[in-house]
Structures are given as structure tokens and as C-alpha cells.
Image: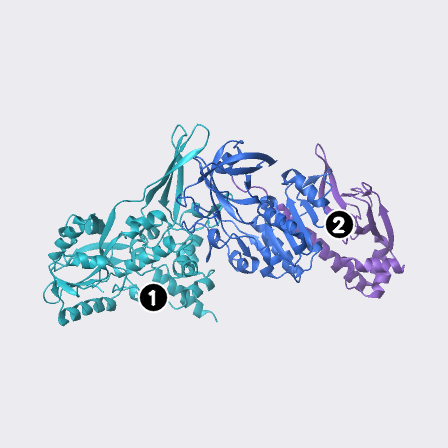
Chain colours: A blue, B cyan, C purple
């Protein structure tokens, strides 16, 4: 597993990666594709669901999920919400940033084999789910019905628009996109994502759902899935908390008994529900 | 097994011990009186030990008092723990220089070249070091700075015969006798002739012991040492029922006691600073004025800060109530899930150094009583 | 009429009603079809009809000056549009427009209100089902009010 071996650098030292492409997704979100600098070691080889710590030189570091798994490039979709992410989003092709990782566990795509797959994404949550969706589509015959339910604030806030149109045109996948607010030029749904779960076409008795979005949206989505009969052990979510190291040493990403950088970020709702039910845990 | 039998030394031989360690290139650190407390600092010689001093500890109170004898180790523990040397409050992790083409080179900070010798390590502290070993060395990633400092550290344990007012190592199963994890262990005997029992725990310990003026331990020495430690076990300042603490804490997350302690806790974080096992850190990424030189520094952090749980524009734990609960439930409960042991060694520092005197044994007992009271 | 009964028995809002009741309701129903962009209703117009969409989707809209038509919610297959027929002044609150070709069942509100007056037990059955629809819509609307995708911080 050459991808896991840190080339003689301490685990807290970032490896320089160069931005090879930069695409604006929405008003505040960009997708960057990165390649390791010479001497920075092999491409990372992350699994769907994992994250890296991205370092903007001299400014700081943030945990960002991998948004596409690629043989040679590291792909991240970043929303500019603070000084570090703003700096990262401002990097032009040719700029260099630091990378540590990949860290965390992966979406249990193998576990979903032979079953219907429901992918429920809210906002930037589609980014960490995209590698799982693409994996399922690359191994399409191994899965049952595949559904993507995706919601954003407005049509302008939707990620991967062109890719979504291509996906929607496929006959082996059902795509339903909704927004909170739209003007009349929007021909898609208007309403919240959890509402789409009620009418989605999947077998609740065996389907596996992967859900990512703002925590409250994940909560309502999980409840809508439970109401349809999907067991809590087959609902998988990706959690976020403050992270300073990604190594299990800094103590920040604790959620009760679990360390999100080490035991997560992917958890089943069955495991997560009792923890998120306690306010301010 | 070491060929040096359990021996006895006179208090004066501690000078030879310190000298012997220094000659071998160790930086000798141990207890000394400074600023009204017994702290851990560099020891130039054994005369710097807190000879004839003891401590009086209560919730929110610490005072030194003169003893009537010349005991070298006649106190419990002070505000310092050994984590400040193995896991310093501020460590530069690396420096980086940006090149003209935008790339940067990271220069790893060399791991500390010095070798520590800790003189006077309590049994509870040995357990604390073991607990931090699990955090920093026992996972998928090894904390390199800690590993380097820890590897060569020479440990001279000092068994307790004078427990503190806030000690509860017996309840936690971490003392007062040091069982393992030391190179040498001393048990000071004041009954009759003032002497110290010396036990060896490693080959390195044997080597150092051979340079000391020893005499073989007699049965009465062994009995006296045992009695001294047993006496300490009987005079614990505090007690704690540890039965299924993780379960108890998981069940009482909304107990009204948390509201009660929240009216007292200042969220100052003193407890996390003095606790020998607390390990939270944060990183500071900075750059110089030209923007070409950057560095990352790791510093101690505390879960009591609002910033600790900051995410998406707010803190997950904005109230003192939830932050106190996080600390206590982690220390005695979820630490087991995360690292396989309790996070507490019963040293009592958090009780002594809390400015408002919050006592963890009292808080936990209240949670347990409250639970049993529910029909 | 039999075809209508079958069609309305599939609608979630009429789930669990007896065959007799379904027949009663079917007496007030008829098939309708709308082209894409057809306007089903306008704000302020008399609301004497409600629809259950069978195929296609429909937008609830309102016109906001200087902003244009804003979609409030979209309604799809199996869902109900229109509950203004339940209470005076029986007028549509919003505009309703077909986003695709739409096949729906249209219900005469006045006719149904009459039947409910005659048979209060039927009235209770319909009211509780519509209450459920309204509550669910309200709950999801409240979730939307949380504006979960907006960054809740200093920006």
C-alpha cells in the first residue's frame, strides 16, 4: 500500500501538491485537481469517503473530503467559508498547497452489493458522496436500483451541473434534484431533500443509503429513510467535527466515544443516532 | 533478571544517583521547591530535592509545610506532571520555505536530542505516562516528538508514603506502589534509620545502581518499606466507586448535576493543564512578513475553550455545562472506548488546582446517587 | 366511473377509505390533462377544485414584483394540490402551473363539501386526511425555513 506510506516526513508535515486544474462550481465553491510535486511521493489513492488535510501555505489547514477518486490526481471540492478555505479556493493552476492523508474510513460500497443504493446529498454534501456514486456506476451490474436525491439552496448553488445532467440522462440511474428556492425558470423540484425520500423507488427492506449534508438535513433524511423501513444499520452518513490533526492525537474530533478522524467520518445511523440525540455532546 | 538485589541506600547516596545520571548525559529532572510549590525542574544535585517538605492539599487549596524529618519524598504531587517534558506545551513541528516556483520544502524539526532522567516519579504518574503512551504511540500514527522524548527517558520511581488530601490512586488501581515501568524504584523509610529501599526494574537501572553505595536489603527493610506504602494506601484523601463508570456516564448525560456543576465551573481549564493525561493540542500555522517562511507549532489546548469544538460558524459545545461534561465523561468514560483504559490516575491535581474546588470524586458520586434515586 | 375509482384509490390522500366512500368521492371527480406550462390556477381565483396529480409535476408559484415568478414548492405524482376549497373564501392562495404535461384527477370542491355536509363521517375522514397532507407540507416548509445550506456564521 504505497499510498499510505509517508515518504520519511512526519505525519504532521504536509506534502506539496500542485494545482493542475481549478473549476468554479458555484458562487463560493471550487473543485481543484492536484498532483504531487516531484519528490512528494506517490498519488494518494484515497478511498471514497476519506478526507485529507489541505494546507494553505502559512495560513492553516482544513479537513476536506475527496470528491473524486482518480489514479493520478487528488480531487477536492472546497467551499470558501473561512480564511483557509478562501485561500485554497483562490489558488490558480500552478500554485502549490500542502496535503496530508488520506484519513478516515470509507463508504461501505462493497456491503451494498446486490442491493438498491440510495444516495442522499444536501449542498456541499454531494462532494464526499460523488466518489461512492461513481464507484457504484462503474460497477453498475453489482447493484440494484440506484437513486440520487440531491438538494441545494438555489439552482445556482448546485454542484457538478453538467455531470448531473449527464447522470439524469442515464437509464440505469434515477436522479431527482430539488432546491429550497427557485424562480420559474427552474423545471426541477422545489422542496427539501428528505421529502424526496418518501417517493423514491427502492426496496426499503434491503436498500443501503449514503447520506451527507448539513447535520440537521442528515437527521431528517435518516428519519425519512427509517419511516420507509430502511434499517438504521443500512443508513450511512459522513460526520464532521473540528479537526486539528487527523491522526487521533489532538482530541478535537471527539463525538462521545468515537474519534471522527479515526473511526469515521462514515458511520451508520444506528451507531450515530444515540450520540447526536444528546445536545452539545 | 538484574543481578543487583533489592538494596538499601542512605539519603546521601541520592547525590551519587543524580551525579551518575548526569555523567551519563541525562538531563536530570525532579521535584524541587519553587514559588511555594513542589515543582519538577532541573536538578543540579540531590540537595535541590524538597528535603523536609510536605504538601497540604484540599479542593482549591495547596500549601507547603515543613516536616519534622528530612524526608526527600515526603509529599504527594505538585502542579507539574512529567507530561511537560515528554509532551511539551509548545513544540515547533516543522518549518517550510516557499520557492520561487511556488512549491515549498518542509524541514522537519529534529526530535529532541536530550535524554531525560525523571527522579521521583509516582506510581500514579507511571500510569499516566503509560496512558499517554497509548494515545501517542498506540494508534495508527506515532507522535514522533513524544516517541523520541519517551524512548530514552530514565525513570526513577518514588513510592508514596505520604498521600495527599486529594489523592485517590487506590480507587483507580494506580498506586501507591509502582509495579512496573521504571528503571529504578525508591521507597523512603523513616521508621528507625532514615534510608531508602532501592529496587531495579531494568538493565539500565542495574547499571546505574552498581555505581551507588548499596547494602543488601534485610527483611526488616522490606517490611518497613511495605508498611510505609501500605500506610499510604490507608490514608487516601479521597475515594471513588469506579464500578462501570463508562456505563454510568453514558446513561447520565442529561443529569441535573451537570447544571449544578456548570454554576461553579469557570471553564478556566486549570484541570486540563495540571492533569497528567490530558493531551488535547491545537496547531498554529504562521508565516513571516515576507510570506516565504512558514512554520507549524503544536500547543497544548483544552476542551474547555469554546474554540475547541468550533465548526461552521459556531461551537458544538457553547455552554460551560457541555464543556465540563465533555471533560469528565471523556476522562472517566469515553477514554475507555477510545484508548482502552480510564483516563484518570487518581492523582488529585484537578481537585487541588481547581480555583473553585470542584471535586471529580464528588461529582461522579452525585451522578451515581442520582441514578440510583430514580425509581 | 369505475376507472376513476381505481385511479383515486391509488392516491395516498384517499388511502384506507372504504369502497362506498371512494364511490361517493368519485362522483365528484373527473380526468384532466394539462400541457406543459398550462396554468391550473391563479392567485385569488375561486378554488372550487383540487387535483391529485397522477403523472408529471406542477409548481406552486407566486409573482414577486421585480423578482418574477418564484416557485414555492413543486408537487409530483400521487400528491394533492389545493386545499383552499376546504374553507371560505374558497380562493387560491398561489398560482399553479404545469412543469410538464400533467395527467391528474380533478375534484369538484363544492360537490364534495355538499357530500360531507350530508355525511359528517365522510367529512371527518376527508378532513383528517387533508389535515395530514397540510401538516406534512408545513413540516417540510419549516425545515426549509432553517435555511440549512446557508452558512450560519459570520459571513
Q: Nearer the viewer, residue B294 or A153?
A: B294
Q: Secondary structure at mark 1?
A: loop
Above or below A133: residue A154 = above
Examine the rendering and report whether any part of residue B260 can be seen. Answer: no
Q: Nearer the viewer, mark 1 or mark 2?
A: 2
Q: Which residue is mark 2?
A: C76
* Rendered location of residue C155, percent (x, y): 53, 37
Q: Is A251 on the left-hand or right-hand side of A43? A: left
Residue A76 spot, x, y in % from top left: 55, 41
The mark found on residue B261 in the picture is none
- Position of B50 with respect to A56 (left or right) is left
Chain ID at mark 1: B
Helix or strand or loop: what does disc 2 sit on? loop
Residue B185: in sight, yes or no?
A: yes
Q: Residue B80, how many percent across, how many down?
A: 27, 51
Q: Mark 2, chain letter?
A: C
At x 76%, y 53%, the residue is C79
Residue at the image position 82 percent from the left and 51 percent from the top: C104
Q: Residues within 10 Å of mark 2 (few under 14, many from 20)?
A: many
**Quarter where residue B217 is shown:** bottom left
Residue at left offset 90%, top offset 59%:
C1
Residue, disc 1: B240
Amino acid at each position: 500500500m504505497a499510498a499510505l506510506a509517508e515518504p520519511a516526513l512526519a505525519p504532521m508535515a504536509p506534502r506539496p501538491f500542485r494545482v493542475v486544474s481549478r473549476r468554479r462550481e458555484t458562487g463560493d465553491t471550487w473543485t481543484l485537481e492536484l498532483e504531487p510535486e516531484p519528490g512528494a511521493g506517490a498519488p494518494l489513492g484515497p478511498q471514497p469517503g476519506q478526507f485529507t488535510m489541505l494546507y494553505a501555505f502559512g495560513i492553516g489547514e482544513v479537513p476536506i473530503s475527496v470528491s473524486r477518486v482518480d489514479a493520478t490526481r487528488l480531487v477536492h471540492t472546497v467551499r470558501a467559508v473561512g480564511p483557509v478555505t478562501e485561500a485554497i479556493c483562490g489558488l490558480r493552476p500552478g500554485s502549490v498547497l500542502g496535503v496530508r492523508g488520506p484519513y478516515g474510513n470509507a463508504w461501505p460500497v462493497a456491503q451494498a452489493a446486490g442491493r438498491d443504493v440510495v444516495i442522499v446529498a444536501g449542498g456541499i454534501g454531494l462532494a464526499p458522496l460523488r466518489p461512492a456514486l461513481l464507484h457504484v456506476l462503474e460497477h453498475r451490474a453489482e447493484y440494484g436500483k440506484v437513486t440520487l436525491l440531491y438538494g441545494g439552496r438555489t439552482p445556482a448553488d448546485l454542484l457538478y451541473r453538467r455531470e448531473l445532467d449527464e447522470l439524469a440522462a442515464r437509464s440505469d440511474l434515477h436522479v431527482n434534484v430539488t432546491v429550497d428556492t427557485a424562480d420559474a425558470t427552474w423545471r426541477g423540484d422545489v422542496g427539501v431533500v428528505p421529502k424526496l425520500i418518501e417517493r423514491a423507488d427502492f426496496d426499503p427492506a434491503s436498500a443501503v443509503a449514503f447520506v451527507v449534508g448539513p447535520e440537521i438535513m442528515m437527521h431528517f433524511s435518516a428519519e425519512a429513510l427509517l419511516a420507509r423501513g430502511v434499517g438504521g444499520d443500512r443508513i450511512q452518513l459522513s460526520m464532521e467535527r473540528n479537526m486539528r490533526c487527523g491522526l487521533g492525537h489532538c482530541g478535537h474530533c471527539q463525538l462521545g466515544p468515537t474519534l471522527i478522524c479515526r473511526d469515521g467520518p462514515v458511520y451508520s445511523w444506528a451507531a450515530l443516532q444515540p450520540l447526536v440525540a444528546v445536545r452539545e455532546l | 533478571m538484574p543481578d543487583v538485589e533489592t538494596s538499601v541506600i542512605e539519603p546521601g547516596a541520592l547525590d551519587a544517583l543524580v551525579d551518575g545520571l548526569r555523567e551519563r548525559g541525562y538531563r536530570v529532572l525532579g521535584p524541587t521547591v519553587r514559588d511555594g510549590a513542589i515543582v519538577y525542574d532541573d536538578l543540579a544535585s540531590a540537595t535541590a530535592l524538597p528535603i523536609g517538605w510536605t504538601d497540604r492539599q484540599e479542593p482549591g487549596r495547596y500549601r507547603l509545610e515543613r516536616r519534622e524529618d528530612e524526608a526527600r519524598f515526603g509529599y504527594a504531587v505538585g502542579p507539574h506532571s512529567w507530561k511537560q517534558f515528554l509532551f511539551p506545551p509548545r513544540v515547533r513541528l516543522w518549518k517550510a520555505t516557499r520557492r520561487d516556483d511556488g512549491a515549498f520544502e518542509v524541514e522537519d524539526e529534529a526530535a529532541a536530542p536530550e535524554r531525560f532522567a525523571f527522579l521521583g516519579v509516582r506510581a500514579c504518574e507511571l500510569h499516566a505516562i503509560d496512558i499517554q503512551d497509548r494515545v501517542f504511540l498506540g494508534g495508527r500514527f506515532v507522535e514522533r516528538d513524544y516517541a523520541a522524548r519517551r524512548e530514552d527517558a530514565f525513570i526513577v520511581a518514588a513510592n508514596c508514603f505520604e498521600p495527599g488530601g486529594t489523592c485517590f490512586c487506590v480507587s483507580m488501581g494506580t498506586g501507591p506502589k509502582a509495579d512496573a515501568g521504571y528503571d529504578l524504584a525508591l521507597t523512603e523509610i523513616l521508621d528507625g534509620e532514615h534510608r531508602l529501599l532501592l529496587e531495579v526494574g531494568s538493565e539500565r537501572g542495574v547499571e546505574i545502581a552498581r555505581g551507588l553505595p548499596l547494602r543488601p536489603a534485610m527483611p526488616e527493610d522490606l517490611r518497613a518499606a511495605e508498611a510505609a506504602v501500605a500506610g499510604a494506601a490507608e490514608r487516601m484523601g479521597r475515594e471513588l466507586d469506579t464500578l462501570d463508570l463508562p456505563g454510568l456516564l453514558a446513561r447520565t448525560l442529561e443529569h441535573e448535576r451537570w447544571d449544578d456543576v456548570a454554576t461553579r465551573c469557570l471553564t478556566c481549564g486549570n484541570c486540563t493543564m495540571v492533569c497528567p493525561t490530558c493531551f488535547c493540542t491545537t496547531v498554529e500555522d504562521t508565516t513571516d512578513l515576507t510570506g516565504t517562511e512558514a512554520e507549524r507549532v503544536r500547543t497544548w489546548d483544552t476542551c474547555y475553550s469554546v474554540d475547541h469544538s468550533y465548526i461552521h460558524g459556531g461551537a458544538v459545545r457553547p455552554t460551560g455545562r457541555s464543556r465540563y461534561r465533555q471533560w469528565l465523561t471523556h476522562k472517566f468514560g469515553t477514554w475507555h472506548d477510545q484508548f482502552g483504559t480510564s483516563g484518570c490516575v487518581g492523582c488529585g491535581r484537578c481537585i487541588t488546582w481547581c480555583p473553585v474546588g470542584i471535586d471529580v470524586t464528588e461529582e461522579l458520586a452525585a451522578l451515581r446517587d442520582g441514578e440510583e434515586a430514580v425509581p | 366511473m369505475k376507472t376513476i375509482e381505481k385511479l383515486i384509490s391509488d392516491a395516498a390522500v384517499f388511502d384506507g377509505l372504504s369502497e362506498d366512500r371512494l364511490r361517493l368521492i368519485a362522483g365528484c371527480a373527473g380526468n384532466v390533462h394539462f400541457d406543459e406550462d398550462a396554468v391550473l390556477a391563479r392567485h385569488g381565483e375561486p378554488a372550487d377544485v383540487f387535483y391529485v396529480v397522477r403523472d408529471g409535476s406542477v409548481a406552486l408559484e407566486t409573482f414577486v414584483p421585480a423578482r418574477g415568478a418564484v416557485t414555492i414548492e413543486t408537487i409530483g405524482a400521487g400528491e394533492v394540490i389545493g386545499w383552499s376549497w376546504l374553507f371560505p373564501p374558497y380562493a387560491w392562495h398561489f398560482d399553479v402551473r404545469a412543469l410538464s404535461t400533467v395527467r391528474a384527477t380533478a375534484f369538484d370542491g363544492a360537490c364534495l363539501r355538499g357530500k360531507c355536509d350530508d355525511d359528517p363521517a365522510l367529512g371527518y375522514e376527508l378532513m383528517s386526511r387533508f389535515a395530514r397532507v397540510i401538516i406534512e407540507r408545513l413540516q417540510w416548509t419549516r425545515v426549509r425555513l432553517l435555511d440549512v445550506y446557508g452558512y450560519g456564521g459570520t459571513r
